Amino acid sequence: MNLRKLVLSSLLLAIGLILHQIVPAIFMGMKPDFFLSMMFIAIFLGDDYKLALIVGAAAGIFTALTTTFPGGQVANIVDKLVTCNVVFILYRLTKNKLNSQVQMAIIAFIGTLISGLVFLGTALLFFGLPAPFSALVLTVVAPAALINTAACLVLYNAVSLALKRISY
């Protein structure tokens, strides 16, 4: 892991956190999770397992600090640590086999689903849920995965273009 990748990852997470805080809900109270999208992009660009774990831990801590879900602190940390591992494994399995756009779309969708399922499962296990698990998956997690996939593709293209322009 080199310093350049660590700095880039921390900048991406900072941008994701800011976007996550200022973007209003766009569809039935749902908003894209820019922080999760930037976590995926940081894992893609870092291409290092240690860095992926650091990114996942940092994302878990920051989402735990900013969550509005009752008891969501523990669930956020567990969710991000599991998700960063799954995303890194999926990234490595599909690396050089798919177009980067297709790869990012697939991994963003699966990663968001995993994140939502782990979050809800952890919250259910430790604190309980305000609605049935299946209802939350269908009404919150599935639409969030679709919205987050689109947001992730837009952000990935923007970051890739910016990195090309500065000759990263």
Image (tube, rainbow, N blue to C red):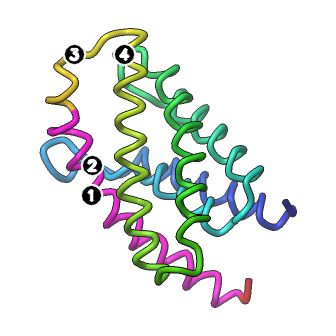
Asked whether the residues under the numbered discs 2 and 1 touch, taking CB atoms below 8 Å apart as contact, a structural biologist would say yes
Q: Which mark is residue 147?
A: 1
User: 71 left or right of 91?
Assistant: left
Q: How far apart are marks 2 and 1 (CA)?
A: 5 Å
Q: What stretch is highlighted in magenta?
A: 137-166
Asked whether the residues under the numbered discs 4 and 3 touch, taking CB atoms below 8 Å apart as contact, a structural biologist would say yes
Q: Which of marks 4 and 3 is nearer the N terminus?
A: 4
User: 46 left or right of 142?
Assistant: right
Tag 3 residue: 130
Residue 156 on image: x %, y %? 49, 72
Q: Residue 144 carries which label?
A: 2
Residue 73 on image: x %, y %? 50, 21
Callout 3 secondary element: loop
Asked whether the residues under the numbered discs 1 and 3 touch, taking CB atoms below 8 Å apart as contact, a structural biologist would say no
Please tell me whether mark 4 or mark 3 is closer to you in this view: 3
Residue 149 on image: x %, y %? 34, 62
Type of amino acid at the residue the image marks with label 2 = Ala
Type of amino acid at the residue the image marks with label 4 = Pro
Residue 79 on image: x %, y %? 49, 33
Callout 1 secondary element: helix
Tag 4 residue: 70
| Residue located 65% across and 69% down the image | 45
Q: Which of marks 1 and 3 is nearer the N terminus?
A: 3
Callout 4 secondary element: loop
Q: Earlier in the sequence, mark 4 or mark 2?
A: 4
